[in-house]
Amino acid sequence: DVKVTQSSRYLVKRTGEKVFLECVQDMDHENMFWYRQDPGLGLRLIYFSYDVKMKEKGDIPEGYSVSREKKERFSLILESASTNQTSMYLCATEDRDMYFGPGTRLTVT
Amino acid sequence: AQSVTQLGSHVSVSEGALVLLRCNYSSSVPPYLFWYVQYPNQGLQLLLKYTSAATLVKGINDFEAEFKKSETSFHLTKPSAHMSDAAEYFCAVSEGGGSYIPTFGRGTSLIVHP
């Protein structure tokens, strides 16, 4: 079974803080993704990575960055959190099918 | 470019009734099509997928979907709803011959009444 884990299920941060969301997968997949999910908007792609040290912008990269130093770990970074980044964040890996983590519900106050 | 439209943000059915969740897609190449389900406080799970083989695709928990190229549709059905089917359902499309990055619809919340 593919396992995708995310470091926190719930997170509360203050405006302006630097926020790290971690994602780890155990299936040696090359492709990893970060999405945010908002009611009525579905899933929107923030960043993705096809390989270590490689990253590509998705549809809504503004205000975010990513890091992939090791194949199994893909981190999403909010350099200076803002209230409009309050959302559910989903990490996924892909190997023909997509496998999602449980999500991190981030609240920025 | 690829896109997905899910008709109806909420669908309400009685337990035992037919479930029909609608999905229309747009793709410039033959598409791969997916349905995912998200139970409360969980990530998405793959229900079923179409990858250019049989047009009627069967998935888990008695769900199925039919690819209709002429209608650019991939509607999800289940003959008899169960209370445990209450969840958010997402349709997705990817351009199978090239990038596997799917584009997701906005989701349909299925409500099942006793």
Image (cartoon, coloured by chain):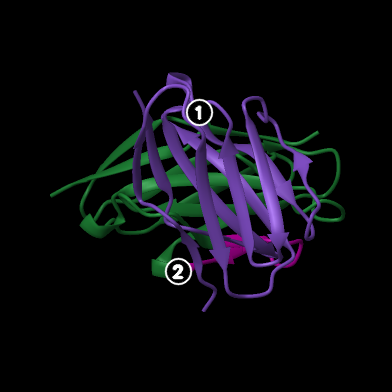
Same chain for labels 1 and 2? Say yes or no. Answer: no
Residue at the spot of label 2: B60
Question: Which of the pair B73/A71 is nearer the observer?
Answer: A71
User: Left or right: A89 with respect to B88?
Assistant: right
| Amino acid type, callout 2 | Ile
The residue at the far left in this view is B114
The residue stretch that appears in magenta? B48-59
Q: Position of residue B15 (x, y in %)?
A: 20, 53
In the rendering, at what x and y percent does residue B107 appear? 47, 38
- Count of numbered badges drawn on the protein: 2
> Where A102 falls versus B5 (above or below)?
below
Chain B drawing hue? green
Left-right relation of B52 to B93: right
> Where residue B13 sits in the image (x, y, percent)?
26, 43
The dot on residue A41 is: 1
User: Residue drawn 43% across and 50% down?
Assistant: A103
